[in-house]
Image: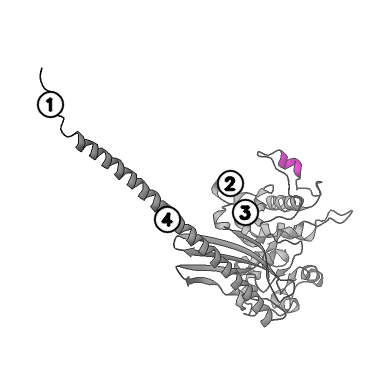
Amino acid sequence: MTAKRPQRGVALIVILLLLAVMVSIAASMADRLFSQFKRAGSQINYQQAYWYSLGVEALAKYGIEQSYKDNDDSINLSQPWAQELDSMPLDYGTVSGKLYDAQACFNINALSELEQTAGSAQLPFLVEKFQNLLEELQVDNYEAETVAQSLWEFVDSNDSVNSSSGVEDSHYEGLSPAYLSANTLLADSSELRAVNQVSGEVMEKVSPMICALPTTDFRLNVNTIMPEHAALLAAMFYPNLSTSQAKQILENRGPDGWASTDDFFAESDLSGLSEDVKKQVKGYLSVDSVYFELDAEVLVDKSRVRIRSLLFSNNRETATVIRRRFGGIGERVSSRSAEQK
């Protein structure tokens, strides 16, 4: 019989195998630890950005309240609230944003409680004005009429069709997916996209000039309408004022705006208007505002927080946040090419 040869290197192989397993476990633990560390860092940065955003909100409230304190009668673009915050450095981050007058736009919720005069085919004034706004924005006349009347039917409180070109639940129930008209105030102007005939192209044109305030009141502040939104003013006086004339009025506006609507109507470009036209429009114009919208973005390291807050004042002394949301229009593309239908 031959003697068994001693096995050599087995211990070394076992040790190498154990070492490989230990290195693999250590690498996995290090990777998990790094991921958890990175996640915790991101959460801390995001939380810091969140609190910074609330600080920006408090700054906006102060700007509004200071503006009310400085001027008892009007809101204009020379006041503290209107100062744009391009980029302000913070500890470990930056903040940028702007406070907008939420009454320098067409409040589409104002159509909610409108009623047609009994025995008359005349549409409510604001329904006509919304159609005129669309036409001023180069929307086809028939499409503008359909959108304006459909919006009125969409937000009114009944289920009956009261206009020649509007639609109600029966139309939306036939779509895929099916849905119902709101029959109440809209929470956001982007909901206009759900209204009959509102294409992505129409939405892209009109969205900078509309808003959905939590009220059916309509007061357009002539002191804060931007010249690029002159179509708003032209629509209110349609067909007596062109967009170019309205733009000229706004461009010639002083830094403090007009002290009253009477001063506004004293403008030479409006002198040719009849008293009936002035009387009809005057009730929808103002030089004061009680609704403002903050749109701000805070960046801490790589953590980004976008805040949009609606602020309201019921006494021209203090401002209160009545709506707040994180994320904004930039994240919700309601006019993307896939919807151009």
Quadrant of the snapshot with the N terminus: top left
Which residue is identified by label 1?
A: 5
Q: Are marks 1 and 2 in contact (CB under 8 Å)?
A: no
Amino acid under label 3? Met
Percent position of residue 19, x then y: 26, 42
Q: Report how far apart the C-alphas of labels 4 and 1 lie in the structure.
A: 55 Å
Judging from the image, the colouring scheme is: one colour
Please state which amino acid type lies under the numbered disc 2.
Glu
Residue 38 image label: 4
Q: Residue furthest top?
A: 1
Q: Which secondary structure is most common in the magenta stretch?
A: loop
Q: Which residue is mark 3?
A: 203
Give the residue at x 23% y 39%. 15
Q: Is 200 on the left or on the right of 214, as rendered?
A: left
Let me know if residue 109 appears in the view.
Answer: yes
The quadrant where residue 208 appears: bottom right
| Residue at figure coordinates x 13%, y 24% from the top left | 4
Which of the numbered marks, if any, corresponds to residue 321? none
Locate residue 146, reporting x and y percent.
Answer: 72, 50
Mark seen at residue 339: 2
User: x, y percentage for residue 257?
Assistant: 66, 78
Earlier sequence position, callout 2 versus callout 3? 3
Residues packed near mark 1 inside 10 Å, few (<14), some (14 to 19) or many (20 plus):
few
* Sequence-earlier tag: 3 or 4: 4
Q: Residue furthest right?
A: 119
